[in-house]
Amino acid sequence: MTTTSERVRPTAMYVGLGLTILATLVPVLDIATVDTLAGHVRDAYPDWGADDVRKDRDAIAIYLVGTGALGIVLWVLTIRAFTGGRRWARAAMTAACGAGLLVALTNLSLGGDHYDVVVPYGYGVLTLLPCLAGLVAVVSVWRPARRA
């Protein structure tokens, strides 16, 4: 019989994967709809023309989508490793969570010439959400298994 913490592990991982997919899609959906990323660039560089704003906006979006795609790959690999009973699954999950936290904290703090932060705060917080699920998963896999 499994305990609640053993059932939380895959659930937290799947929640983290879903949040990462969401965080990866949001920049693309934003550009296709309201384009807050372009507004963020225009606020930092009001004298720039539309072409320069578009290039910088695209660079930010590509970065967000690229790091999100890498996060998706890491989630899938760690979920498969964990559910497949691989010995290295806990270490891989911990390393992936650390990498995700590093990226998310960088997103929340990295400034630029005229930017307070290059990645808008809303996107930085969005990239932090999967890390919370990752922390739950990491804590649960390192806890000793209890039998009911």
Image: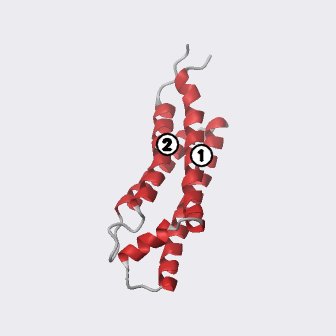
The answer to whether residue 111 is above or below residue 97 is below
Query: Is residue 88 in sight in this rendering?
Result: no
Nearer the N terminus, badge 2 or badge 1?
1
The answer to whether residue 132 is above or below residue 43 is above
Q: Is residue 91 left or right of residue 106?
A: right
* Measured Cα–Cα span from mark 2 to mark 1: 12 Å
Query: Identity of the amino acid at label 1?
Result: Gly
Residue 121 is situated, as x and y percent measured from the top left of the image, at 39, 59
Query: Identity of the amino acid at label 2?
Result: Gly
Of the pair 41 and 79, the residue shown nearer to us: 41
Q: Residue at x 55, y 69 (%)?
A: 62
Residue 103 is situated, as x and y percent measured from the top left of the image, at 44, 58
The answer to whether residue 69 is above or below residue 77 is below
Which quarter of the figure is the N terminus placed in? Answer: top right
Q: Which mark is residue 134?
A: 2
Residue 113 is situated, as x and y percent measured from the top left of the image, at 33, 77
Of the pair 30 and 70, the residue shown nearer to us: 30
Which quarter of the figure is the C terminus placed in? Answer: top right
Query: Is residue 25 in sight in this rendering?
Result: yes
Of all residues, the one furthest to the top in this rendering is 148
Is disc 2 placed on a helix, strand or loop?
helix
Mark 2 surroundings: few (<14), some (14-19) or many (≥20) residues within 10 A: many
The answer to whether residue 25 is above or below residue 112 is above
Residue 8 is situated, as x and y percent measured from the top left of the image, at 55, 30
Q: Residue at x 41, y 63 (%)?
A: 120
Is disc 1 placed on a helix, strand or loop?
helix
Q: Residue at x 37, y 58 (%)?
A: 108
Q: Residue at x 41, y 76 (%)?
A: 42
Residue denoted by label 1: 18
Mark 1 surroundings: few (<14), some (14-19) or many (≥20) residues within 10 A: some
Q: Is residue 49 left or right of residue 11?
A: left
